[in-house]
Image (cartoon, helix red, strand yellow):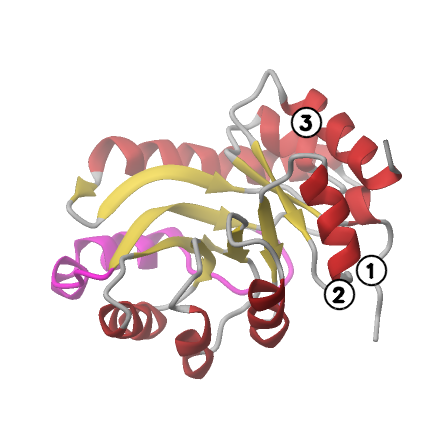
Amino acid sequence: MKEIGKNINTINNQLKDSKAKLVAVSKTKPNSDIMEAYDSGQRIFGENKVQELVSKYEDLPKDIEWHMIGHLQRNKVKYIAPFIHLIHSVDSLKLLKEINKQGEKNNRVINCLLQIHIAEEETKFGMDEKEVLELLESQEIKSMEYVKIVGLMGMATNTDNEKQIEREFRSINVFFEHLRSEYQSDNIEIKELSTGMSGDYQIAAANGSTLVRVGSSIFGARNYG
């Protein structure tokens, strides 16, 4: 078995006692690497740039489940609306409205996660808990027929302090469980929690993550082109 397949097997073995599924983060990686992962059984892939995502969707097998994990600009939604399986990074009502509009044009409901700001860095995108509650209780969300809110996404602080990372993942999991028990409707079905990346996915899995976004631990260091 090739290296990428071995890495995927190792990670899946580490996750087997948790609820977490592996999202293989393939940004900047060539199609040959993705096919190596695909041939080992991986079907969920995450990208953070729309142009690259569209190109890979067109070239690669159609049973791949594509996830948009990067910051998404409203004017780019139309390019991924026909095929995207899950958008992890919804951080405003304006973006959600655009996703709903493009979902209607393509006659498909688009699954979305609300991105929560849990890290100490100011650079991370995301809403706070109050903004999420206001959004879920708004009249606008009730009228959106082409989006489904299926959970939350969060990124921990970039630190070596594992206690801090665990605290941040635990806090979003508590909020996630609250939403799961309180908010369920036609277009709100809270079931996915996307936390954890290559450096901290095991901590995330131990704290309720259902989707871990792992790139370099599978494919090696990123290619900066």
Residue 134 against residue 170 in the figure, above or below: below
Location of residue 86 in the rendering, given as x and y in whole percent from the top left corner: 43, 53
Residue carrying label 1: 222
Q: Nearer the viewer, residue 40 or 94?
A: 40
Q: Position of residue 144 (x, y in %)?
A: 18, 63
Q: Secondary structure at mark 2?
A: loop
Q: Which mark is residue 12?
A: 3
User: Is 175 left or right of 137, judged from the image as shown?
Assistant: right
Range of magenta residues? 119-146
Name the spot of residue 17 as percent of width and height, x first.
60, 16
Q: Earlier in the sequence, mark 1 or mark 2?
A: 2
> In what element is the residue under mark 3?
helix
How far separated are the C-alphas under marks 3 and 1?
A: 21 Å
Q: Is residue 96 above or below residue 159?
A: below
Q: CA distance from mark 3 to mark 2?
A: 22 Å
Residue 112 in the figure: left or right of residue 136: right
- Rounded to the nearest angstrom, the CA distance separating label 1 from label 2 is 7 Å
Residue at 53%, 65% in the rendered image: 125
The residue that label 2 is drawn on is 28
Q: Callout 1, which amino acid?
A: Arg
Res 22 quadrant in image: top right
Going by the numbered disc 3, the residue's amino acid type is: Asn
Asked if the residue at tag 2 contacts the one at tag 1, i.e. Cβ–Cβ closer than 8 Å, the answer is yes
| Viewer-nearest residue: 53 or 15 | 53
Mark 3 or mark 2, earlier in chain? 3
**Residue 47 against residue 113 in the figure, above or below:** below
Q: Nearer the viewer, residue 32 or 193?
A: 32
Q: Amino acid at mark 2?
A: Thr
Q: Residue at x 36, y 72 (%)?
A: 95
